[in-house]
Every structure is written in structure tokens, then in C-alpha cells.
Amino acid sequence: MQTAQANDRPGDQRHTGPSYTEVQAGAEFGELRTAHRSFAFPLTVAFVTWYLLYVLLSNYAGGFMSAKVVGNINVALVFGLAQFLTTFLIAWWYSRHAAAKLDPRAEAIKARMEGEV
């Protein structure tokens, strides 16, 4: 009974491009990582701060949060709905950022690793 080795399976492709560690050490990968981090980290900090502000105001500023804005709609409801709105806006903004700045760089790195370039 013959067993196939992992590299002998039909359809397997051998990669002729650089290894992952070589790519990771390269400048292009560093630029990709920097482009991601310079967008994601500040936005994450801003959103977490915004969320914690909402929680703290809800706990310690009951009078302010219960202030009526229009009819039965108070500040707490407006802030709560704004949390959802900002979540969707951030997701949309990140999607545009990734499509414009991250995806092309990542595809170029991937193509080079797979030996297509």
C-alpha cells in the first residue's frame, strides 16, 4: 500500500518565491504593516475612548444623560445610537482604506511569494 507524501499530492504547487521570513523582514511588508497600524490603532483608541465616555456618562452623569433632546428622546439614546452609527462608519472607512492602500500592497507581496512576479 502506497501512501502519498504531502508534497506529492496532485495539484500541489511548489512556491519558488521568497520565504515568509524574508518577506516579513522586507521593507514592503514593513510599509504594509505601518499603513495598517497607522490607521487601525488610532481609530481603535478613539472608538474605545468614545465608548468608555458613553459608559462613564451613563453611570456618573445621569442628569445630563436623561436630559430631553426632542420629545421623549434623551441624550443617552442619542449617544447610544451614535455608537452604532460610528461603528458602521468606521467599518466603511476601513473598507475604503484597505481597498485603496492595503490590498494592493498585500496582493503584490502575495504574488511575489507565490512566484508569480
Image: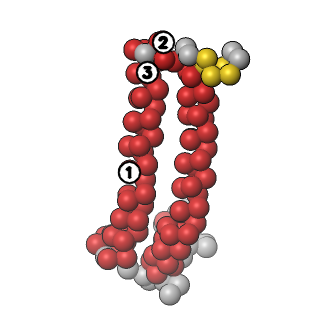
Do tag 1 and tag 2 residues touch (Cβ < 8 Å)? no
Q: Residues within 10 Å of mark 1 (few under 14, many from 20)?
A: few
- Please state which of residues 17 and 76 is positioned toward the viewer in this rendering: 76
Q: Is residue 84 above or below residue 11?
A: above
Q: Amino acid at mark 2?
A: Gly
- The three-letter code of the residue at mark 3 reads Leu
Q: Please name the residue that numbered disc 2 is placed on.
A: 63
Task: Kindly identify which residue carries mark 3.
Answer: 57
Identify the amino acid type marked 1.
Answer: Phe
Q: Residue at x 53, y 62 (%)?
A: 97
Marks 3 and 1: in contact by CB < 8 Å?
no
Q: Is residue 72 left or right of residue 100?
A: right
Please state the horizontal and vertical placement of residue 3, each as a whole percent of the image: 52, 63
Measured in 3D between alpha carbons, the distance from the residue under mark 1 to the one under mark 2, in whole angstroms, is 33 Å
Mark in front: 2 vs 3 = 2
Q: Nearer the viewer, residue 77 or 40?
A: 77
Q: Earlier in the sequence, mark 1 or mark 3?
A: 1
| Residue found farthest to the right | 71
Q: Earlier in the sequence, mark 1 or mark 2?
A: 1
In the rendered structure, are the residues bearing label 2 and label 3 in contact, judged by CB atoms less than 8 Å apart?
Answer: no
Residue 49 coordinates in the image, percent (x, y): 39, 36
Quadrant, the N terminus: bottom right
Q: Which residue is mark 1?
A: 41
Identified at 48% across, 17% down, the residue is 64
How far from the left and from the top, in percent, is residue 7? Answer: 48, 71
